Image (cartoon, helix red, strand yellow):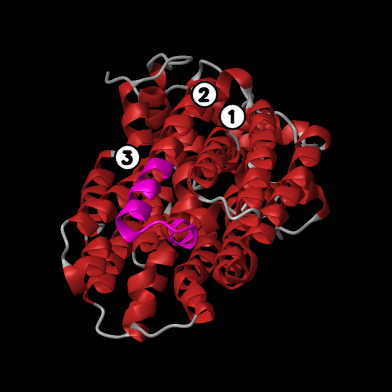
């Protein structure tokens, strides 16, 4: 008699090849997220000149993708529940591909805006589904670092975008250089689409859909928290508790208040640091400080490399130190670096002092908020509303990103120092929130986190 998947011993407390492969492939949504986010930083001057844009219209053009991310992050929750996490990732790969080619070939401002909006839909969707898929697949002992692979790939994508922008600038392609910057993203989007065929559906989604035998097979390959596939499935079924909770029950209810407020807070603070202003306008900021085009592009590469190095450092310790300690270190780094950046603009020193402060800023972000946000959002909501909860956190993140990115060129043109001082003040607020409110979630199963937050 052929053994069922549940008859095989579950692999627990160690990383299996199936788990690693699935996490890496899903996290590639983050790579495209990062590239799509940062590539425009090298095209700001071209956009302004080519489409004859004012500072306000440049901000709106850059923010057009972010409008798409808001829509994508809100809409993707129900799609992820209906189609499955893996099914949505296929759709996102196609959107990334269309956006890359469309922006590269855009013949006017409105077509460019349309294709950037499609890219934004994909970014918003990826910010929800990639970390959620990995969290639902991973045993608690490894969940932090595996979900943080999404953030690693986001910053790797940012670095690749900055690096490709720099190489394209050095090639002196003239009028077409910005088009090449956008077009290169089509290749990784196509690779992502093909690799998605190698990974399974989320086992927790499969249980929610009553496809228990398929879920058993996935858990047998990827491991469980309890060491038993059957116990894992029973715990998930209890957390879903579909006999007492309708699948389509209202999300904004008193019993979900804690995770909702936690999600809104961490997402808002993420953007009130000014991180997207730096990523979208890095070359623009260095131009403001007196650097030429090639030098500004190179300094953006240095920013991206620093981001990658400190994200890798956070990845190695997030499951040992926990989420709160990383957030504490990052908050202090934010406050110090943003204060120095503000001073640099007030004193018109620019140059090495500005670059140094922004390098400390990006290191603080990578080691703290950047590494933690997508992990934390994927952990704090119950199984039955996780897609909608993650969508809420991501949509708040992207709404704030749009506001920051749209307003930055207008405010910075008048006073760059005041802009960075405001971000520093906001990070004092984040430090207090981490100290007084934020719970620790390291090493705790998703179902146990639900109980600790008092959700029946």
**Residue at horizontal 66%, vertical 56%?**
346
Tag 2, which secondary structure?
A: helix
**Residue at horizontal 29%, vertical 48%?**
163
The answer to whether residue 149 is above or below residue 122 is above
Q: Looking at the image, which is closer to me, 277 or 384?
A: 277
Give the mark toward the camera: 1 or 3: 3
Residue marked by disc 3: 25
Quadrant of the snapshot with the C terminus: top right
Does residue 273 appear to the left or right of 253 in the view shown?
Answer: left
Total marks in image? 3
From mark 2 to mark 1, how far is it between C-alphas? 6 Å
- Looking at the rendering, which quadrant does residue 302 occupy? top left
Main SS, magenta residues: helix
Residue marked by disc 2: 230
Residue marked by disc 1: 234
x and y percentages locating residue 354 in the rendered image: 54, 47
* Residue 91 visible from this viewpoint: no
From mark 2 to mark 3, how far is it between C-alphas? 27 Å
* Earlier sequence position, callout 2 versus callout 3: 3
Judge whether residue 137 is colored magenta.
no
Tag 3, which secondary structure?
A: helix
Q: Are marks 2 and 1 in contact (CB under 8 Å)?
A: yes
Judge whether residue 287 is colored magenta.
yes
Q: Looking at the image, which is closer to me, 344 or 28?
A: 344
* Residue 317 visible from this viewpoint: yes
Quadrant of the snapshot with the N terminus: top left
x and y percentages locating residue 125 in the rendered image: 46, 58
Point out the stretch of residues depicted in magenta. 284-303
């Amino acid at each position: 008699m052929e053994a069922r998947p549940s008859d095989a011993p579950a692999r627990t407390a160690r990383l299996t090849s199936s788990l690693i492969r699935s996490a890496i492939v899903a996290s590639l949504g983050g790579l495209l997220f990062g590239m799509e986010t940062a590539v425009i930083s090298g095209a700001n001057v071209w956009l302004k000149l080519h489409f004859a844009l004012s500072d306000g219209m440049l901000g709106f053009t850059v923010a057009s993708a972010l409008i798409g991310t808001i829509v994508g992050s809100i809409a993707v929750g129900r799609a992820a529940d209906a189609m499955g996490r893996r099914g949505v990732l296929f759709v996102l790969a196609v959107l990334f591909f269309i956006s890359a080619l469309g922006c590269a070939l855009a013949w006017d401002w409105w077509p460019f805006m349309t294709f950037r909006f499609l890219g934004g839909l994909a970014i918003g969707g990826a910010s929800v589904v990639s970390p959620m898929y990995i969290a639902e697949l991973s045993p608690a002992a490894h969940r932090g670092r595996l979900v943080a692979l999404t953030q690693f790939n986001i910053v790797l994508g940012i670095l690749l975008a900055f690096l490709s922008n720099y190489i394209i600038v050095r090639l002196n392609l003239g009028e077409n250089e910005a088009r090449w910057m956008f077009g290169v993203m089509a290749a990784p989007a196509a690779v992502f689409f093909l690799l998605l065929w190698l990974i399974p559906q989320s086992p927790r989604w499969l249980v929610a859909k009553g496809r228990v035998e398929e879920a058993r097979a996935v858990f047998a390959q990827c491991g469980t928290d309890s060491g038993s596939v059957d116990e894992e499935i029973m715990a998930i079924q209890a957390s879903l508790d579909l006999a007492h909770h309708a699948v389509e029950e209202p999300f904004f209810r008193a019993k979900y208040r804690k995770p909702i407020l936690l999600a809104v807070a961490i997402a808002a603070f993420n953007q009130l640091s000014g991180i997207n202003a730096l990523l979208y306008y890095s070359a623009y900021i260095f131009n403001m400080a007196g650097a030429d085009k090639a030098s500004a592009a190179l300094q953006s590469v240095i920013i991206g490399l620093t981001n990658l190095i400190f994200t890798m450092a956070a990845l190695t310790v997030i499951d040992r130190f926990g989420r709160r300690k990383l957030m504490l270190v990052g908050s202090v780094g934010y406050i110090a670096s943003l204060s120095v950046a503000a001073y640099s603009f007030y004193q018109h020193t620019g140059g090495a002092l500005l670059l140094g402060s922004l390098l400390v800023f990006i290191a603080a972000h990578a080691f703290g908020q950047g590494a933690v946000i997508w992990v934390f959002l994927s952990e704090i909501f119950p199984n039955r509303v996780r897609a909608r909860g993650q969508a809420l956190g991501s949509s708040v993140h992207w709404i704030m990103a749009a506001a920051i990115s749209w307003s930055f060129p207008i405010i910075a043109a008048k006073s760059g120092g005041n802009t960075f001082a405001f971000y520093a003040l906001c990070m004092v607020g984040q430090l207090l929130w981490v100290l007084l409110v934020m719970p620790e979630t390291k090493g705790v199963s998703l179902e146990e986190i639900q109980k600790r937050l008092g959700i029946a």
